Image (tube, rainbow, N blue to C red):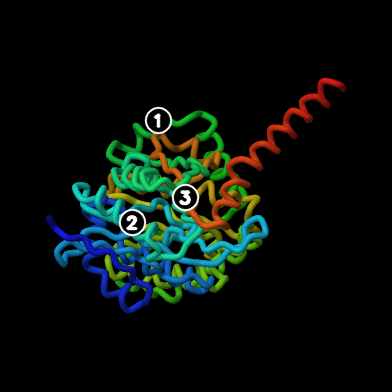
Amino acid sequence: MPSLETFIISDEDGFQALANDWNRLASLTNADSVFFRHEWSDASWQWLKQEGCELCIVCVRRDGNLIGLCPLVRRRITLAGIRMRKLSSLAVPDNQEFSLLADPQDVECVAAALFSALRNGTVQWDLLDFEKLPCELPSTKALLNAASESRYAIQETLRHANPGIDLRGGWDAYYGRRSRRLKKGNNLVRNRLERDGKVVEIQCIDSSNDDLDLQSLLRVLEDISARSWKSVTGLTLDNPGPGAFLARLSELASRNAWLLVWLLLIDQKPVAMEYQLEFNGVVSGLRADFDDEYSDSSPGTLLNWRIIEQLFGRDASYYALGPGSNAYKARWVEESRELVDVVIYGNSLRANAVRTLQLYVKPFVKRILGKNGASSREDD
């Protein structure tokens, strides 16, 4: 019987040495997902290590050959006043999906080996947080089954829809199916800019641009991001973590011909942008920002319209807009892919205390408060 070996990679040299095997397993898991690639995790790590995270990449070998891995990070958190050891996906907010990486025929034994390592104390942990697991992938089912068979408590915390657009039809037919409200809004934005005498230009920048100056482009993107309404979130590109992430991602994406950036200029000033990756025919929208000073001109609306129109003319099959229930997305999309977040509770006293609080105490209190609120309304 083939022997399995589970080991942990926690240093950067070991992480980088995995690149070739990592990408082989990523292709076997889903050949069209850029988010499973080593390059994506490399860029994400540039952000996460600034937040005090530690690498915890669980690897599984069979007869000396790497057959699967689960890219995780470790951190200390405080939850409900309790200090916790948390494992979570090696992922940043820009991530659109996450998975255990393995050949589908090996995914069940790799998931079982992962939870065996978690059970036998190879890794010290209290909580395991998986975000944006694709519901249709065998790896998601294998992970949850292995956790259940290990008798861990599992809590589904959130369901996401990652909306998208099939680009294989023509633009005219697709836009003809859009609502009158959407078309009217687009035309109002365009007409307002023209009426005000603004000179509007859309630039598409990709890895094929011979004169691409990556550092200059990053400065433009950072400036737009810093001036957006998102500046209060701490996630804009002028912050160290997000800035380091996008700088590394842009370097790797440019090298691999994945980079796709759109800029909207008003009177020659860049005021809106969208940052995308184009991989195996799938365009993934990662970041969209606009200068808040120009909010009355609705530059984001105009740029989004023109991007989708021009994507129909590229050699791409699908545009993933990114998880989120934004109203503007609903007006454009015709399909979506379902994702799920889950938390798995360990067997430590700390984990059991938090599990009791999250699964039983908080729902009970919410029910009581809800009943009291309903009674008060009836009394009124």
Residue under the image location 34 percent in, 60 percent down: 117
Q: Secondary structure at mark 2?
A: helix
Disc 1 marks a residue whose amino acid type is Gly
Mark 3, residue position: 344
Residue 176's disc number: 1
Disc 3 marks a residue whose amino acid type is Ile
Q: Number of marks in the image?
A: 3
| Nearer mark to the viewer, of 3 and 1 | 3
Regarding residue 217, the answer to whether it shows in the image is: no
Relative depth, front residue between 308 and 81: 81
Mark 2, residue position: 116
Please state, as top left, top right, bottom left or bottom right, where the N terminus lies in the image.
bottom left
Pick whichever of labels 3 and 2 is earlier in the sequence.
2
Q: Position of residue 52 (x, y in %)?
A: 52, 73
Q: Secondary structure at mark 1?
A: helix
Pick whichever of labels 1 and 2 is earlier in the sequence.
2
Q: Secondary structure at mark 3?
A: strand
CB under 8 Å between discs 1 and 2: no
Relative depth, front residue between 255 and 324: 324
- Neighbours of disc 1 within 10 Å: few (<14), some (14-19), many (20+): few
Whole-angstrom CA distance, mark 3 to mark 2, is 14 Å
Residue 202 falls in which quadrant of the image? Answer: bottom left
